[in-house]
Image: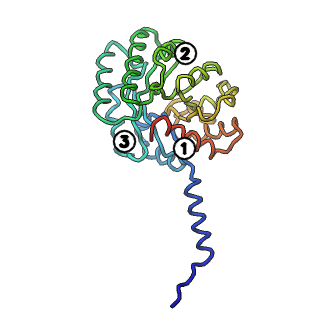
Amino acid sequence: MPKMKPPKFRWLLYFIIVITYFCEMIITDTHTHLYSEQFNEDRNDVIQRALDADVSRFFIPAIDSTYLDSMLQLEKDFPENTFLMMGLHPTHVKENVEEELAFVKNWLDKRTFYGVGEIGIDLYWDKTFLKQQQYAFRQQIKWAKEKKLPIAIHCRDAFDEIFEILEEEKGADLFGIFHCFTGNLKQAKQAISYNMKLGIGGVVTFKNGKIDQFLNEIPLEHIVVETDAPYLAPTPFRGKRNETSYITKVVEKLADIYQISNEEVAKTTTQNSKDIFGI
């Protein structure tokens, strides 16, 4: 009996499946605190909303030793989507800085992390521990270099202090993300000169955010997207708890700024995240 040829529509179906596969939009949230207490009541729902919105890669920055168990549980619950970082947040640098840094180093040596962060300097709330913050920032940069890992920089009211240290540490082995970038064009270009991508989040959607006024002068290849959830929710959710699914508002704003499609923004920024984190 001769073989029957498959109906023509079957080839069309195969074509649609292939095109759908390669055109699937993947959005990467490069900075989200999904382990935060603010998600304790509905964390699974929050993550499902993100997945439904095509946000399927979550990079998780550390704060201090008290949050590690929650981070590890998040990774256990969502192993295919969650990528952990390790570090000491500058606002949590206190008298026990040596103890906290020892904790960071111990865990960096113990298992795989995808970045060192979030680290940096924050002079908005308190300048009491500036020297300790500078010390912690330098030390964690050195560990990142040793491990060949990217850094995630937290900077608030401290561009000069951050750039001073980056200038000392600059080189091929220094790279990462300038998280929640809110500086001006000159500062953006300086951050990029240190092999940093600019982490763009909800601020770009604010009327007084200002970065939307010059961002089109920065090639999209230097940008990644983030939420910093549960903080800094984009418009129209400003003032409410932020969540990872809201990153679509950031993608939409960047698409408008660069006059390209949402899909192109998602594709380029996700590739940028892969270039940084190696995954």
- Numbered label attached to residue 75: 3
In three-dimensional space, the C-alpha distance between marks 1 and 3, rounded to whole angstroms, equals: 18 Å
Circle 2 is placed at which residue position?
A: 159
Depicted 115 relative to depicted 187: above or below: below
Q: Earlier in the sequence, mark 2 or mark 3?
A: 3
Q: Residue at x 58, y 44 (%)?
A: 267
Secondary structure under the numbered disc 3 in the rendered image: helix
Circle 3 crowding by C-alpha within 10 Å: few under 14, some 14–19, many from 20: some
When the figure is inspected, residue 195 is found, relative to residue 244, above or below; the finding is: above
In-image side of 269 versus 32 (left or right): right
Element on which disc 2 rests: helix
Q: Are marks 2 and 3 in contact (CB under 8 Å)?
A: no
Residue 58 position in % (x across, y down):
46, 40
Q: Amino acid at mark 1?
A: Ile
Neighbor class of circle 2 (other Cα within 10 Å; few <14, some 14-19, many 20+) is some
Q: Residue at x 47, y 17 (%)?
A: 121
How far is the residue under mark 2 from the one under mark 1?
28 Å
What is the x, y in percent for residue 197? 55, 30
